[in-house]
Amino acid sequence: MSEEPKSDWDPRSADALADQIAAYDALRARCPVAYSDYLQWSLLRHADVMQVLLDHETFSSAVSSYPSVPNGMDPPEHGLFRRLIEPYFAPPRMQAFEPLCRAIASELAAALPKAGDVELIDGFAQDFALRIQCAFMGWPGDLHEPLRQWTRKNHRATLAGAHAAKAEVALEFDGYIRGILEARRAEDHLAGDDPTDRLLAERIEGRPLSDEEIVSILRNWTVGELGTIAASVGIVTHYLAARPELQRQLRQDLSLLPAAIDEILRIDAPLIANRRITTRAVELGGRRIEAGERLTLLWASANRDEDVFDDPDAFRLDRDPSLNLLYGAGIHVCPGAPLARLELRVVMEELLRQTLHIALVPDQPPVRACYPAGGFSELPLRIG
């Protein structure tokens, strides 16, 4: 058995938790393939992350102790479920969902003070993420608050690295979803067209999906949606509040928003990391990594790699979008990216349309979120 590497850094140190982006920038410069007891091998360079994403034979996605459909699957099983899932995010379905998405965003934006201070994360961004996810899934509004509390517990368990706590949190979410499935079946509610009803009626290789598979799909969609959409709204709004000229430009030309949002979220990641496990020994960045080792792909670092993004802090709309790893790359690129892009475009359009200006609040600095969340945990803003 090979000797465990010495730790190169502490992902849960005070400095790393206070400002993840700055910590990853510094680590990328001195140790781009870094070992820690908490995350094992962390990859910080764009090239190393891309190597992993494009080689699913050496770097397996089957890292979870519970089923993860399709995120935690490898080919050929992954392809079967991926083909089943992709139509849920096809252009006609996004077009059909946009009016409801806009109604929710408009209502929340209209409820903000016409002039005054607001805490954007708790007072707007999280509400939008919860309401929009439940609306897309066809879930009842009484799930908003349980899901809000569940998201917080999930973050705490992940940061603590407590396996028992993470398993308990996963089971709690599974209970919510199984309750919905039971209610739908009891009501013979399978004639609807929301994703939950559709999954109940799906078949794969001639058989119905198992409840375990449906719960896993819905868990992946929800976990990915709630935290990252709320974080993204906060990151983009903060970026514009700190840059009045860019804010004015986007207010005058909302057609620039999609590219602007992707670029802002490249600079400041809403989704910090993803995982893989090696199937055989491999060398990355001059480090030998044995088979069975866990890898953490740090999107928040790879998307700021100076070798790929000249002056990574510079906001530029002319960058090559294929290099942006906001939604991943390769066979596991996020299938829900069309939905996330729709939601972020619409909510920012409504936020800009229903305000005259958004600014930072003097003497009230925002509070950065800590791993595994990105963005801000508190974001005081002044709206006029």
Image (tube, helix red, strand yellow):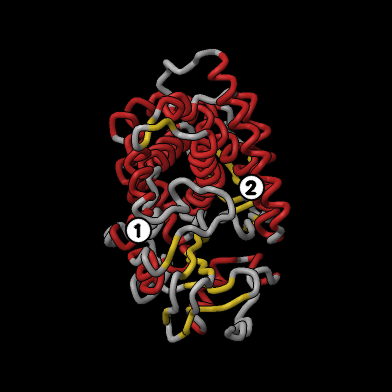
Element under label 2?
strand
**Which quadrant of the structure image shows residue 370?**
bottom right
Front residue of 291/159: it is 291
Q: How many marks?
A: 2
- Please name the residue shown 62% across and 49% down the image: 379
Question: Is residue 256 visible in this depiction of the protein?
Answer: yes
| Circles 2 and 1 in contact, beta carbons < 8 Å | no
Residue 259 coordinates in the image, percent (x, y)? 33, 50
At label 1, counting other C-alpha atoms closer than 10 Å, the crowd grade (few under 14, some 14-19, many 20 or more) is some
Residue at the disc numbered 2: 380
Eyeballing the image, is 200 above or below 294?
above
Eyeballing the image, is 289 above or below 252?
below
Residue 164 coordinates in the image, percent (x, y)? 72, 54
Residue at the disc numbered 1: 329
Residue 376 coordinates in the image, percent (x, y)? 60, 53
Q: Which mark is residue 245?
A: none
Front residue of 367/113: it is 367
- Please name the residue shown 48% across and 66% down the image: 297
Eyeballing the image, is 189 above or below 154?
above
- Cα distance between the residues tagged 2 and 1: 34 Å
Question: Is residue 357 visible in this depiction of the protein?
Answer: no
Q: Going by the image, does 217 lie left or right of 257? A: right
**Which quadrant of the structure image shows residue 59?**
bottom left
At label 2, counting other C-alpha atoms closer than 10 Å, the crowd grade (few under 14, some 14-19, many 20 or more) is many
Residue 126 coordinates in the image, percent (x, y)? 59, 39
- Please name the residue shown 38% across and 54% down the image: 332
Q: Going by the image, does 121 lie left or right of 87? A: right
Amino acid beneath label 1: Ala
Amino acid beneath label 2: Pro
- Please name the residue shown 40% across and 46% down the image: 248
Q: Quadrant of the N terminus?
A: bottom right
